[in-house]
Amino acid sequence: MTSATAAAFRPSPWKRMGWIALAAYIVYACAQLDVSADRVASGWHNAAHFFARLFPPNFSRWELLVKGLKESLEIAVLASTLGIVLSLPIGFVAARNLMPAWISWPARLLIVASRSFHPVIVAILFVKAVGFGALAGILALTIASIGFIGKLFAEAIEEISLKQVEAVRATGAPFGSVIAFGVLPQVFARFIGFCTYQLDSNLRNSTMVGIVGAGGIGGTLFAAFQRFDYDYVCAILISIITLIMAGEVLATGVRAIFIDGLSLVDLFRGRIGRLAARGERHLEDD
Amino acid sequence: MLSLKHLSKSYVRGKPVLNDINLEIAARGITAIIGPSGTGKSTLIRCINRLVEPSAGAVVLDGEDLVRLSRKALRQARRRIGMVFQEYNLVERLTVMENVLSGRLGYVSAWRAWRRKFPPGDVARAFELLEVVGLSGFAGSRADSLSGGQRQRVGIARAVMQQPAVLLADEPTSSLDPKTSVEIMQLLTDIARDRAIPIVINMHDVELAKRFADRIVGMAGGSVVFDGPPDRLSDATLKTIYGGEDWLQ
């Protein structure tokens, strides 16, 4: 019996050794970084003190707050638009199933380069290059968008069904029409998904690049931290949360309209119900 | 009209999938190619419109050797060759109408295709064809909401939309149930007759081939081993094509 079990589920000594190695490394890293029970306890005490000073939030300097938020929003929208426009062609030529290697490899290299650094590092580079302010933030987040959308768009194209492309090719369609009828319809919905996700992500990052002087609410936040204005910090954080949530709602709406083909009216009626009804109809058809 | 001359194809050097195929396809009628799986039926049909590049030989359509054509000339030649696929190969996320109209892509510039600006005559003919294949009212439905039989009807409409000189069908009924298979074969036969389009069909259902084809080509091991009308297809011939005999009882 046991020998049968052993034959059915062959034990792998390598897997077991991998787990043991991981556990050992975690213990080692904790020791190296002085993460001990005492350290956690003292941190806990400090955190309680800090959180007490955050409340109540202080909105008395709201003009500065609104100015920063507006700038962040503008940075995010401009960077997303520019990033999407640039990443479409880059992602497209990076797809190895449609493009020859000599053109897809440089495009992939460009995408990898855009992805190698965190947006904050890129923002620091641009602040040094073009000076303090929103322009540096826009450029930094554009680079981030190219890296993210370009990579995912290329991967989406590489996963398409070539049978559908073959059928369009067999009609004698020129290359541009093969793209329009055979390729884009297969990736369009996912592309919209990437774009709304990236807008969401840029919105979050645009509140942060200000910390290194690249414009937006981040600069105000950083200054408030340094002055120990914790109640104002709290007001800023609450505003950022509101902004991000508004962005989320907007992204959901865009996805519903472009991907599910719903109208704004449908959205107000309740998207889930409509989709469920649609799903049932699909099942009946099959 | 369409003739294959000494057509050969090997994916791996020295292991030919197609071995010196010679076939003349007349300007009318249905030619069914039968044979066991893996004998090169699909490769043969794909060599005709060069979705698969032949290794040697010629494919002559209306006096023009397709094998020698440049990419651009090949695109123009493909406009005259309709193709129906085993798995329909519709663009799933496009509507039925867009799928049917994609049969005209060879005649419309890419710029117009992007904006869906097809000539009104093409659109009218697409509606007409949808009626012929029994799908009037489905123009706006997305292809992925249709059943298998309906999808294959769209596939046929797309191919006929090209106004082809010849129609190739690669196992068009193999993904369908027996009843739908007969309906699809009936539809193809009607189109071949009414529009005088010769059809070359790959199939593995011998009974279906006998029932609908005017001519049967039997293939085995990459070569043609039988070529004649359905009534001359004897059990002995089927044995040479498929090997063994137990399955015939």
Image (spheres, coloured by chain):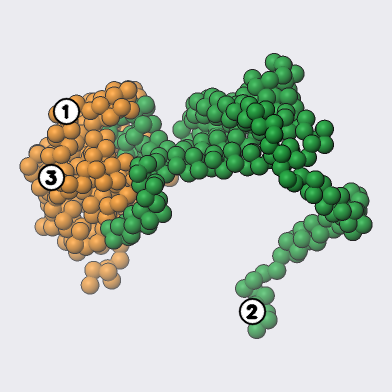
Answer yes or no: do the residues labelled 1 and 3 have beta carbons within 8 Å? no
Q: Earlier in the sequence, mark 1 or mark 3?
A: 1
* In the image, farthest residue toward the bottom: A1
Q: Residue at x 55, y 32 (%)?
A: A150
Identify the residue at horizontal 69%, vertical 31% (top origin).
Answer: A61
Q: Is B222 above or below relative to A2? A: above
Q: Position of residue B231 (x, y in %)?
A: 11, 57
Chain bearing tag 2 is A
Both marks 1 and 3 on one chain: yes
Circle 3 packing at 10 Å, graded few (<14), some (14-19), many (20+), is some
The subunit carrying tag 3 is: B
Give the residue drawn at x 76%, y 58%: A18
Q: Colour of chain A?
A: green
- Give the residue number, with chain letter if any, for mark 3: B131
Tell me how far mark 2 sits from mark 1, CA to CA. Answer: 70 Å
Q: Residues within 10 Å of mark 1 (few under 14, many from 20)?
A: few
Q: Quadrant of residue A179?
A: top left
* Residue toward you, A222 or B47: A222
Query: Could you tell me which secondary element the residue under label 3 belongs to?
Result: helix
Mark 2 nearby-residue class (10 Å; few <14, some 14–19, many ≥20): few
Residue bearing the label numbered 2? A4
Query: Looking at the image, do the residues carrying marks 3 and 2 touch, with CB atoms under 8 Å apart?
Result: no
Question: Which chain appears orange?
Answer: B
Answer with left or right where residue B243 lies relative to residue A253: left
Q: Are marks 2 and 1 in contact (CB under 8 Å)?
A: no
Instruction: Look at mark 1 in the image and give the residue it sits on.
Output: B120
Q: Which numbered marker is on residue A153?
A: none
